[in-house]
Image (spheres, rainbow, N blue to C red):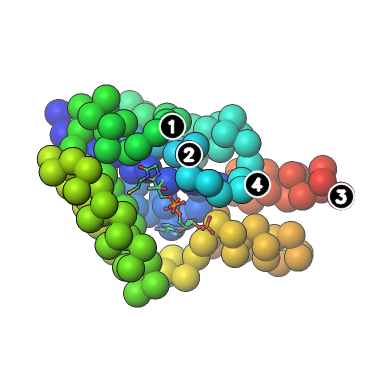
Amino acid sequence: MRVGVYPGTFDPITNGHLDIIERALNIFDKVVVAIAIDNMKNSFFTIEERVSLLEEVLKPYGDKIEVDVFSGLSINYIKEKNSNVLIRGLRALSDFEYEYQLSHMNKSLDKSVETMFLMTSVQYAFVSSSLIKQIISLGGELKDFLPTVVEEKIKEKFKESI
Ligand code: COA
């Protein structure tokens, strides 16, 4: 069984991530969507909230998807999942430099690991979780970029924080 691992922060999952996951499912028998907890980002949603949103949004794909959380290096984690492929989405040119660095660093840590890049679909090329949270917090509507459940949860969380 071909397993691909899609690591990220997913704070929260957007339609841009979903687009990458759906396309990865055409290549792999199973995709593990894994929240990295050691990437030094300040998160808006807790790990539990992010897992629960991922599980809800990815429920329609059944057991072809596994939602998980990992700490430590992604190259070690993917082996635990019987995979050697890290899936990453590339948006604009600005992603390239960072992804180039990550993939080469991972390769130098473990030669057997491959990073597979999928070009983000053009309608999501300028989407990011931070931008979405900022726009919603300022009263903007962004239905095309987010699963409804995620949009509701962001609004709810902002209300709680007022
Ligand atoms: N559509 C829309 N947005 C996308 C996207 C897509 N297809 N792909 C990425 N993004 C956005 C995300 O929303 C996120 O936005 P934000 O910065 O506003 O939150 C941003 O792009 C990058 O997010 P993500 O893909 O989650 O990457 P990351 O930089 O947060 O995390 C890891 C990268 C998890 C792969 C990396 O930190 C890692 O491997 N960590 C484990 C520790 C490790 O092994 N370190 C050594 C690495 S060499």
Residue 8 is left or right of residue 64, and the answer is right
Pointer 3: what residue? Answer: 162
Q: Identify the element where label 2 is drawn.
A: loop
Pointer 1: what residue? Answer: 71
Q: Are marks 1 and 4 in contact (CB under 8 Å)?
A: no
Q: Nearer the viewer, residue 68 or 43?
A: 43
Q: How crowded is the residue under tag 1: few (<14 C-alpha within 10 Å), some, or many (20+)?
A: few
Residue type indicated by callout 2: Asp
- The label on residue 38 is 2
Return the residue found at the far front.
108
| Rendering quarter of residue 58 | top left
Pointer 4: what residue? Answer: 44
Q: Identify the element where label 3 is drawn.
A: loop
Q: Position of residue 9 (x, y in %)?
A: 48, 46
Q: Identify the element where label 1 is drawn.
A: loop
Q: Is residue 24 visible?
A: no
Mark 1 close to ligand 1, CB under 8 Å: no
Q: From the viewer's perspective, is residue 97 above or below residue 106?
A: below
Q: How crowded is the residue under tag 3: few (<14 C-alpha within 10 Å), some, or many (20+)?
A: few
**CA distance for labels 4 and 3:** 14 Å
